[in-house]
Image (cartoon, rainbow, N blue to C red):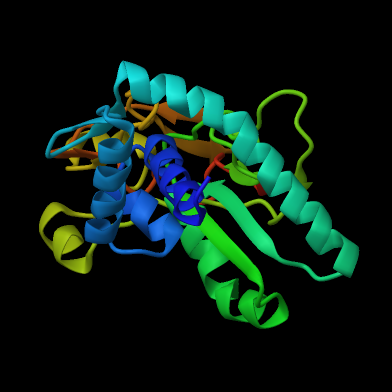
């Protein structure tokens, strides 16, 4: 095998794994155009199309899927061999893949990136911001960040934050024209922003708490989005700490 063969196969595997040329290129630290050229060379050398590409998606062909399934255990074994070699030197190095919802990546990971890099300059972080809460094991992630109520059964989890309270908020301009709601029931007369769970597509029910009792309610409004997160009322019942699993 030529030295370039492994790089081409690694690039192909990264595209299948990430489902995107752009994300795979970012993961590999190369440009999308260079990655495309690498795959063209690989397909030309093998004499077979490995990927079906459209303007919006990329997926392996039957031949490509077969090649990827054969490559996966080999790549894992090579990564393990490199990790063992690094461990023998006592140096912390390698790739650390973390899956986290957008708010957790912003709140917990982003503020610590500089300090982490200074402490572990040989570690490459691959942070995937994913509100759909993909399967951490199936996605070959080393760790994931989840809200407490989203923890899967039988996982090893470490608490990262204290309980967090969500609040319902509005701009001063909006309140000056529509008035201030005094109770959750008043929200039915207001234009609320709904949030859709990326995985299931269900619409989040706003969470509240009164006299120590939690309850949920649906709200109406002109906008539903899967970006960001749900809302709640002052001192709401949505008090879920974040965990590393």
Q: For residue 49, which quarter of the picture?
A: top left
* Residue 57 sits in quarter: top left
Residue 106 picture location, percent across and down: 47, 63
Tell me what residue is drawn at x 44 percent, y 37 percent: 17
Query: Could you say which is closer to the camera, residue 21 or residue 226?
Result: 21
Which quadrant: the C terminus? top right
Q: Residue furthest top?
A: 62
Using the image, determine if residue 221 lies above or below residue 95: above
Residue depicted at 10% across the width and 58% down the height? 177
In this view, the residue farthest toward the front is 1
Which residue is at a point 25% across and 34% down the rendered structure image? 58
Of all residues, the one furthest to the bottom in this rendering is 118
Query: In the image, residue 38 lies at what x, y percent?
Result: 31, 51
Q: Looking at the picture, tell me which residue is in the foreground, 113 or 219.
A: 113
Residue located at (49% from left, 51% from top): 2
Residue 212, visible in the rendered structure = no
Left or right: residue 75 compared with residue 176 = right
Percent position of residue 114, x then y: 57, 80
Q: How many marks?
A: 0
119 vs 3: above or below = below
Q: Is residue 49 left or right of residue 9?
A: left
In this rendered view, identify the residue nearer to me: 18 or 108: 18
Residue 216 seen in the current view: yes
Q: Closest to the observer: 91 or 239?
A: 91
């Amino acid at each position: 095998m030529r030295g370039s063969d492994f790089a081409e196969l690694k690039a192909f595997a990264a595209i299948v794994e990430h489902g995107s040329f752009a994300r795979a290129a970012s993961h590999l630290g190369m440009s999308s155009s260079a990655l495309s050229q690498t795959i063209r060379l690989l397909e030309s050398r093998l004499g077979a199309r490995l990927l079906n590409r459209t303007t919006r998606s990329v997926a392996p062909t039957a031949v490509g899927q077969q090649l990827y399934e054969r490559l996966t255990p080999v790549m894992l074994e090579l990564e393990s061999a490199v990790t063992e070699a690094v461990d023998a030197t006592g140096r912390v190095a390698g790739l650390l893949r973390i899956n986290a919802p957008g708010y957790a990546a912003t709140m917990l990971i982003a503020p610590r990136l500089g300090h982490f890099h200074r402490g572990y300059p040989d570690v490459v972080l691959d942070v995937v911001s994913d509100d759909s809460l993909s399967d951490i094991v199936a996605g070959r992630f080393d760790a994931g960040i989840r809200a407490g109520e989203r923890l899967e059964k039988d996982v090893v989890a470490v608490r990262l934050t204290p309980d967090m309270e969500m609040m319902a908020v509005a701009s001063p301009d909006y309140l000056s024209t529509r008035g201030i709601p005094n109770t959750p029931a008043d929200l039915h007369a207001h234009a609320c922003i709904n949030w859709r769970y990326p995985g299931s597509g269900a619409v989040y029910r706003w969470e509240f708490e009164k006299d120590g009792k939690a309850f949920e309610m649906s709200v109406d409004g002109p906008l539903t989005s899967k970006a960001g997160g749900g809302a709640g009322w002052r001192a709401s019942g949505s008090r879920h700490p974040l965990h590393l699993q």
